[in-house]
Image (cartoon, rainbow, N blue to C red):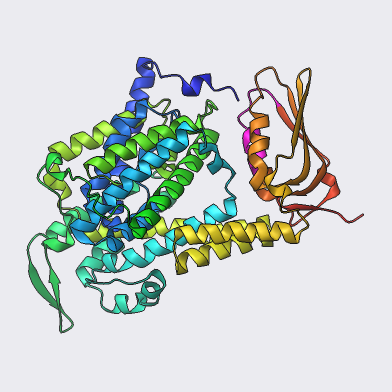
Amino acid sequence: MSQPSASAPSAPPAEGSLASDALSGFLVFLIALPLCLGISMASGFPPVAGVLTAIVGGVVVSWLGSAELTIKGPAAGLIVIALGAVTELGGGEIGYKRALAVGVVAAVIQIIIALTRAGVVASVMPPSVVHGMLAAIGVIIIAKQTPVMLGVQGAHGEPLEMLMEIPAYIADANPEVLLVGILSLLTLILMPRIPGLKKVPAPMVALMLTIPLGLVLHFGDAHTYTIANHTYELGPKYLVQLPGSLLNAVAFPDFSEITSATSIKYIVMFALVGSVESLLSVIAVDAMDPEKRVSDLNKDLLATGVGNLICSCIGGLPMISEIVRSKANIDAGAGSRWSNFFHGVSLLGFVALLPMLLQQIPLAALAAMLVYTGARLASPNEFRHAWQIGSDQLGVFVVTFLTTLATDLLVGVGVGLLVKLALHVARGANPLQMFRSPVRVERDGAKLFVSVAGPAVFTNLLAVRNALADVGEDIEAVVIDLRQATLVDHTFLEKVHLASNEWAHARLELVGLDAFEAASEHPYACRRRRAA
């Protein structure tokens, strides 16, 4: 695929474009600030760690990557890994600094993956596995953050255990803290439904409402109050705690446990899940780019790895290309990477000049934002979408979801992939052929012919992707011949259609697909060859 506009360094945009990028960067900053604080808090890192990451992602990494419109920063999808690393490596400040060391090594691995041009592997991950993992992360976030939103102190345990305890947490809720949390949650839910307010950053509006409410309720002063003969505590421990300056926020990694089994486990998790989630976000943002620019996935992963190396060395959270803020960036009219730069500069200026204001933010408000984010990740619509593609995809989704909840992300993804492979074998796919290149490529004038033999599935999709890399501006049609294929899976069809969206002029033609029986009416449903 031709990528000159994506991989070449951006020239300064025209004055009008610069103003548009500055405005979009500022609007993204309004969304990012509370989310960065909340994600840090939920991850077991100091609240300012997420802001440090977003600043590095905007001010530094903007100029290293290929993706023009992505916003780099901390993401809810990595909360579970970060919190697990901090907790299992000692907890508190010790666990935090050892988790930073894990981040350093994981970042080096990301850089190596990018330099060896292996980053494209993320682009062939089955969507049902990825979405099942993300839905599980959403549920875990809800379980962990609900007690904080309710003002319940000391709640801890495994995700499923904490989910079962939610009725007890509600019964023990601190009423004034709960009031702040509910106000924040309702703001996030209702604002997008009000005509004319959809583009107003709901997270910042939630802070504008809950900070004054916290002041009225004297969150900053340790005291007790009584409701219905029950006494409750209130005080600064329910507010965000920040250092006096950004320099005081800098922390350095502790490598004393870096060779332990726990560290190695989380190194793999950060490197794998972070890379996959980041690259999938880049692909999704490319599809939304009004100019249809195509990012170099390996170059963007290299930039993300460098950013993560910097962040882990100074006390920040891991970063990825974040999809929600990136979409907000596009919706706000961004045209280049300058918007990400302005988003980072805005964060830097706000934290440097107004740190005292940040310390008036109630933790319950941030927890409510994360509960809302978790609910979106684990929305029933995700299950419904998997079912519409086919019962097989719902099965993979649910297995990944439940295994991740019961164990951890790495095991969940691994089991999901094994189930996907087992389904293919059950449908008649030869296990050895699933890992061989099934492609023969020929060109006839302005047409590119790609013949696929054997199973056309996610495990050998890279060969097809490499074949489609030759689709330049002189190609008018790409013909994928499936007459010799034995099985065509959902990942293959979805990724091929996504690739076709990147072509400048070529149209996609699938030949032989009518000889297959689809698992559902969905256009990307898995297909097995009809019996003769």
Q: Position of residue 1 (x, y in %)?
A: 60, 25
- Does the stretch in magenta take in 77? no
Range covered by the magenta-colored residues: 494-506
Where residue 44 sits, quadrant-wise, is bottom left
- Does the stretch in magenta take in 497? yes
Marker count (numbered):
0
Q: 207 or 256: which is nearer to us?
A: 256
Left/right placement of residue 131 relative to residue 462 reads left
Quadrant of image for the C terminus = bottom right
Left/right placement of residue 461 relative to residue 33 reads right
Q: In this view, does 235 lie above or below 448?
A: below
Q: 178 or 509: which is nearer to us?
A: 509
Q: Residue at x 38, y 52 (%)?
A: 78
Where residue 416 sits, quadrant-wise, is bottom right
Q: Which residue is drawn at 66% across and 36% down?
A: 463
Left/right placement of residue 119 relative to residue 250 reads right
Q: Residue at x 72, y 50 (%)?
A: 432
Left/right placement of residue 75 relative to residue 249 reads right
Residue extending furthest front?
259
Q: Where is residue 66 in the image (x, y as percent from the top left)?
A: 45, 28
Q: Where is residue 155 in the image (x, y as percent from the top left)?
A: 27, 72
Residue extending furthest right?
532
Q: 138 or 263: which is nearer to us?
A: 263
Q: Where is residue 309 in the image (x, y as percent from the top left)?
A: 31, 38
